[in-house]
Image: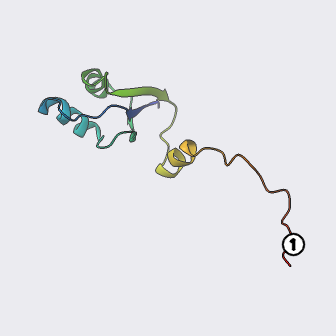
């Protein structure tokens, strides 16, 4: 089963109540929040209503919150080869 990965990229401030209601129905509250929904015509219709505000990808499985956070975390930029002895 495939899923829609929906990320809110633009805020709903100042938009009509109907548009904010669609975002609430999708489970999106904050910018950069990501939710997963099964590929279904009902969700596709809601996505089309807010297509200017969200980014959508089709993925094979829904990720957990920890997996999404780990995916967004950048690399440290360094690695420790060995610990320096302390005097």
Q: Between residues 7 and 57, which one lies in front from this camera angle? A: 7
Q: Residue at x 28, y 37 (%)?
A: 26
Q: Outermost residue, left direction?
A: 17
Q: Between residues 26 and 78, which one lies in front from this camera angle? A: 78
> On the picture, is 13 further left or further right than 6?
left
Residue 64 lies, with reference to residue 15, above or below; the image says below
Q: Outermost residue, front direction?
A: 87
At mark 1, the secondary structure is loop
The percent coordinates of residue 10 (x first, y second) are 32, 31
Q: Identify the image's colour scheme: rainbow, by chain, secondary structure or one colour.
A: rainbow
The percent coordinates of residue 57 (x first, y second) are 46, 26
Q: Residue at x 39, y 33 (%)?
A: 6
Q: Which residue is mark 1?
A: 85
The tally of labels here is 1
The percent coordinates of residue 71 (x first, y second) are 56, 43
Q: Outermost residue, bottom direction?
A: 87
Quadrant in the picture for residue 14: top left
> On the picture, is 61 further left or further right than 10?
right
> On the picture, is 9 further left or further right than 76?
left
Q: Residue at x 24, y 22 (%)?
A: 49
Q: Quadrant of the C terminus?
A: bottom right
Q: Residue at x 46, y 30 (%)?
A: 2
The percent coordinates of residue 36 (x first, y second) are 40, 38
> On the picture, is 66 further left or further right than 42?
right
For label 1, count other residues whose C-alpha is less than 10 Å away and answer few (under 14), some (14-19) or many (20+).
few
Residue 7 lies, with reference to residue 44, above or below; the image says below
């Amino acid at each position: 089963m495939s899923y829609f990965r929906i990320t809110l990229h633009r805020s709903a401030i100042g938009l009509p109540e109907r548009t904010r209601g669609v975002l609430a129905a999708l489970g999106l509250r904050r910018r950069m929040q990501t939710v997963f929904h099964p590929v279904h015509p009902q969700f596709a219709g809601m996505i089309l209503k807010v297509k200017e505000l969200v980014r959508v990808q089709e993925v094979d499985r829904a990720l957990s919150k920890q997996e999404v956070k780990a995916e967004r975390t950048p690399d440290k930029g360094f690695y420790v080869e060995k610990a320096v002895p302390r005097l």
